Image (cartoon, rainbow, N blue to C red):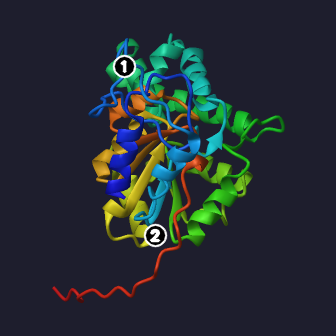
Amino acid sequence: MRHTLNIARQLVRGRAAAPTRFPHARLSAAAGPGLSATPDKPAPVFSDSLKRYMTRHLLDDIDLLVCDMAGTTVEEGGLVYQVLRQSMNDDGLNVSEPDMHPWHGAKKEAVIAHFAKDHTPPHELEDRISKIGDIFLSKIDGAYFGDDSPIEPIDPSLKAFIGNLQAAGCQVAFDTGYPPEIQAGLIKKLRFESVVDAYISSYQVSQGRPYPYMIFNLMEKCNVLDVRRVAKAGDSARDIEEGRNAGCGLVIGVLSGADSAEELMEAGADIVIPMITDLPIPPPKIKRRKSYRIDLS
């Protein structure tokens, strides 16, 4: 996979600012030899078939793909950020959309605390965070699970894509900054219960993104030994930082949600693609019997 990833990087460097998205690779503008883009020397253009060919082995050495939910596997139109901002403003804060952008992927309590701390006496801060959090949960429950909810899988082919990965020997798990009850509700609503191998909320570990603990927990649930055989995919810089901090063998940015290709690359993505379903399906893995020394210490 490392060789394939290096080829993919060389293939597409210099195209991060280009308006045209292509199916299987779009990486940083730090150009390699002979591939840099300058005002008098445009970046090279490659056919879609060549891009697919050069990135076809990306997941060959991956046993577990950990995907974010909102903006990566769940299409919700940014509702979670809109509702959280509205909940804070309803309680007297003045939070703009640009103010919210750096907080994509964070736990709601951390976001509320950041914006409320300068406008709330210290002894009242915890209660205010809890109050705004309750407003948010009430609003998001209606927005996500009401009769006119716009929630749907990020791509109609997502379930088939996950099934094809699993058939090839790659497990798929979800992690999220949603509270557990919201995550479980979405998984039930979208009928993912029998589709994904595992899922976890940041509320079920000591620290959410960019800390790597959700990934480590999912590795345990899925019985994956080596973090280098784990890929992390997400639409926010915090997703990318989570994957980097965990030591994942592959960290993937997607352009179907919050952040731009430039922001995802700056955070440390190995590759940026338009949508999670643009990843290639690897060939079936050869199952090898694993034997470990028994630890009697």
Q: First in sequence: mark 1 or mark 2?
A: 1
Q: Nearer the viewer, residue 12 or 272?
A: 12
**Mark 2 packing: few (<14 Cα in 10 Å), some, or many (20+)?**
some
Residue depicted at x 35% and y 85%: 290
Q: Position of residue 274 (x, y in %)?
A: 56, 37
Q: How many marks?
A: 2
Furthest residue in direction left, as rendered: 297
| Quadrant in the picture for the C terminus | bottom left
The three-letter amino acid code for the residue at tag 2 is Cys
**Seen in the image, is 172 located left or right of residue 60?**
right
**Seen in the image, is 285 located left or right of residue 256?**
left
Q: What residue did someone put label 2 on?
A: 222
Q: What residue did someone put label 1 on?
A: 117
Badges 1 and 2: C-beta atoms under 8 Å apart?
no
Residue depicted at x 73% and y 35%: 142
Q: Nearer the viewer, residue 16 or 252?
A: 16
Residue depicted at x 36% and y 45%: 242
Q: SS of the residue at dot 2?
A: helix
**Mark 1 packing: few (<14 Cα in 10 Å), some, or many (20+)?**
some
Q: Is residue 109 visible?
A: yes
Q: Position of residue 150 (x, y in %)?
A: 76, 35
Q: Is residue 209 visible?
A: no
